[in-house]
Amino acid sequence: LFQSGGQGASPSGKDGAIAPQVQVVDGQIVINRESLSVKAQVEPLMRPERRVEETGNKLSAFSYSGYLTPEKWTKKDTETFYEALEQFGTDFGLIQKLFPKRERKQIKSKFRREEKSNPNRIEEALKKHNSSVCVNSLKIMLDKLKNAEAAEAT
């Protein structure tokens, strides 16, 4: 910033520059000694804060997680689960069709829980699936599947 005769910008450098300022005095470039040091501006330690109150639904990352509220498995549901496991094996997408209010993820979770608590029963159900499939029990399961789809449609 060039100034002539010391006029123009303030000599203390209050115009926002933090670099040394120069002046032209009588045709010579001279460093303004007052611009060599910067005076600290004291800001208030505590600024008054505004209180903001939000109303309505609160959103967070958890809001978008797709979390499903857990629903207890009844004994009847568990028996149907094992029957479906015998017929369809570990095709959880197909088994899920028998439980219209449950997601595939919940069916797979049930499988994992039962695998830990009743490993023999799970193994037995999967062996029956791998062996010859009984046509009558398959018809029964297909009827249950149709009933579940009808219940879902209403």
Image (cartoon, rainbow, N blue to C red):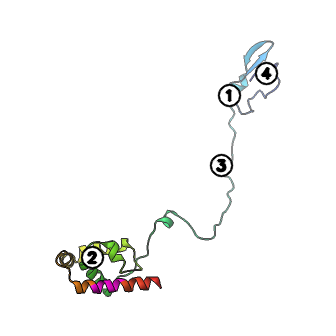
- Image: 52 above or below 112: above
Q: Tell me which numbered mark, 2 or 4, is placed earlier along the sequence.
A: 4
Which of discs 2 and 4 lies nearer the camera? The answer is 2
**Tag 3, which secondary structure?**
loop
Tag shown at residue 3: 4
In the picture of the structure, the residue carrying the numbered disc 3 is: 45
Residue at 32% over, 72% down: 92
Magenta-colored segment: predominant secondary structure: helix
Does residue 142 belong to the magenta stretch?
A: yes
Q: Tell me which numbered mark, 1 or 2, is placed earlier along the sequence.
A: 1
Residue at 76% over, 21% down: 2
In the picture of the structure, the residue carrying the numbered disc 1 is: 37
Image marks 1 and 4: residues in contact by CB distance under 8 Å = no
Q: Tell me which numbered mark, 1 or 4, is placed earlier along the sequence.
A: 4
Which of discs 1 and 2 lies nearer the camera? The answer is 2
Residue 104 at x, y = what percent? 37, 72
The part of the chain drawn in magenta is 139-145
